[in-house]
């Protein structure tokens, strides 16, 4: 996290409430200001609202699969239309079966494999922050 007057805003999108809650707790302990949504539709709307208000999210962490809803691969297209420079991290328990380069080509800034711990979360956020500068 960069040294600023306000903590960086992180948007977390996952269909599992316990994962959203735990991820937000971990992010708060790291000094971030998290917000959680249950699906891509809500995440895109929250991102749009913050972006248009001039208070964009610094990063978005999105689950790839949302049953009966918009997952990360569809949401990234909509987020890129709002903000071509969006910093989006895709996460899934099934990511290990896929090539991380495929996600990077889709516009994601990083890949976070589930289950993840605080150290993994910190590492991916620091690595995408470095790549933004």
Image (spheres, rainbow, N blue to C red):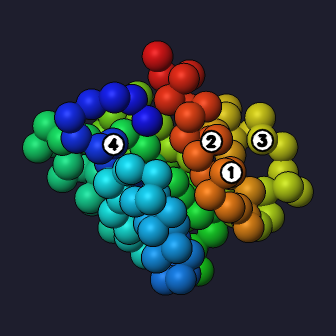
- Which is more toward the observer, 90 or 71? 90
Who's the residue at 34% across and 29% down the image? 3
**Residue at mark 4 to residue at mark 1: CA–CA distance:** 18 Å
Does 29 appear above or below 120?
below
Mark sitting on residue 124: 2
Secondary structure found at label 2: helix
Comparing labels 3 and 4, the label whose residue is closer to the camera: 4
Q: Are marks 3 and 1 in contact (CB under 8 Å)?
A: no
Mark sitting on residue 8: 4
Secondary structure found at label 3: helix
Q: Which residue sits furthest left?
A: 53
Q: Are marks 3 and 4 in contact (CB under 8 Å)?
A: no
Does 121 appear above or below 18?
above
Residue 11 locus on image (x, y percent): 39, 56
Does 60 appear above or below 22?
above
Q: Are marks 1 and 2 in contact (CB under 8 Å)?
A: yes
Check disc 3 and report the residue beneath it: 100
Comparing labels 3 and 2, the label whose residue is closer to the camera: 2
- Which is more toward the observer, 19 or 108? 19
Q: Which residue sits furthest right?
A: 97
Check disc 1 and report the residue beneath it: 120
Q: Earlier in the sequence, mark 3 or mark 2?
A: 3
Secondary structure found at label 1: helix
Q: Is 20 left or right of 98, judged from the image as shown?
A: left
Secondary structure found at label 4: loop
**Residue at mark 3 to residue at mark 4: CA–CA distance:** 25 Å
Q: Residues within 10 Å of mark 1 (few under 14, many from 20)?
A: some
């Amino acid at each position: 996290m960069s040294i600023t007057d306000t903590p960086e805003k992180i948007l977390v999108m996952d269909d599992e409430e316990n994962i959203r809650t735990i991820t937000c707790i971990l992010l708060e302990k790291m000094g971030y200001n998290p917000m959680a949504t249950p699906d891509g539709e809500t995440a895109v709307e929250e991102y749009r609202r913050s972006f248009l208000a001039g208070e964009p999210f610094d990063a978005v962490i999105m689950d790839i699969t949302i049953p009966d809803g918009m997952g990360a691969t569809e949401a990234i297209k909509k987020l890129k239309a709002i903000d071509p420079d969006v910093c989006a991290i895709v996460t899934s328990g099934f990511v290990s079966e896929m090539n991380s380069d495929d996600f990077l080509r889709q516009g994601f800034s990083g890949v976070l494999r589930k289950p993840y711990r605080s150290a993994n979360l910190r590492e991916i956020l620091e690595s995408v922050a470095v790549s933004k500068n």
